[in-house]
Each structure stands twice: as structure tokens, then as C-alpha cells.
Image (spheres, rainbow, N blue to C red):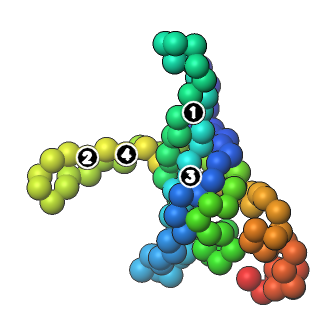
Amino acid sequence: MANINRVILVGNLTRDPELRHTPSNTAVCSLRLAVGSRRKDASGQWIEKPNYFDVTVWGNQGENCAQYLSKGRPIGVDGRLEWREWEATDGTKRQAVEIIADSVQFLGSNQQVSSPVESEEFALGEY
């Protein structure tokens, strides 16, 4: 049986990207994505419920995300799920599932936030 670990989401950033670097100077950008879902409640009324996802973007793509994205910006993410487990400082075991992005698509109008595709720096490859 084949295994498939693929996620495609479109939503809005809930906070500004957070960029950091590994000891070997590889860029790692953390994003928080809100994706809405819609369902009917017991009375038949439609209700909106947001789902929140942590997204990690590595390398040059992570640096571009940190430079060009900001809170509220719509993005599309294509990636895979990764499960982590660790022990917190109080001794309890913690778990999380995050999305490791293979690609991030900047969405929305250029008037909201300029896209790297339209910037001269990106066109010249100086990102």
C-alpha cells in the first residue's frame, strides 16, 4: 500500500512571520495559518469555524516569506505533515502536528502587500 503525506491549504496569516536561523545559518520561517471551515449547527444555521495550523518554511523560501508576508495576508501552502513529541519544562509530554511547506504561494492583491514576483530584487535574483 502506498503512503501519501500531502497537504494543500489556503488561508490567512494570523501573525507576522518569525524568521530564525539554525547554527549552520539555514533560514527557518514560522507561520501561523487560519483556514475557515463552514458547517451547519443543530438548528440548521451555517457557522464558520477557523482551524489554525503551524507552518515551517525552510531556506530561501522562508527568507522570502519573512520579507514579503505579514499578518492577514492570504497564502497557499503545499507541503507535508510532520508529527513532533517533546517533554516540556514541567515534565509533561507534548505533541504537535505541523506543516512543512514545500511551496508557499503569495495570494491577494499587490496593493495589500507587494509580492516578490513584482519586485526588482526578485527579478534580478538578489533575494
**Of pointers 2 and 3, the one earlier in the residue sequence:** 3
Query: Which residue type does callout 1 highlight?
Result: Glu
Looking at the image, residue 14 sits to the left or right of residue 10; the answer is left
Can you identify the residue that label 4 sits on? 96
Q: Which mark is residue 94?
A: 2
Query: Which residue type does callout 2 highlight?
Result: Arg
Q: Nearer the viewer, residue 57 or 43?
A: 43
Residue at 19% x, 55% y is 88
Can you identify the residue that label 1 sits on? 48
Looking at the image, residue 97 sits to the left or right of residue 6; the answer is left
Q: Are marks 4 and 2 in contact (CB under 8 Å)?
A: yes
Snapshot quadrant of residue 64: bottom right
**Of pointers 1 and 4, the one earlier in the residue sequence:** 1
Query: Which residue type does callout 4 highlight?
Result: Ala
Within 10 angstroms of label 3, few (less than 14), some, or many (20 or more) residues? many
Q: Which mark is residue 33?
A: 3
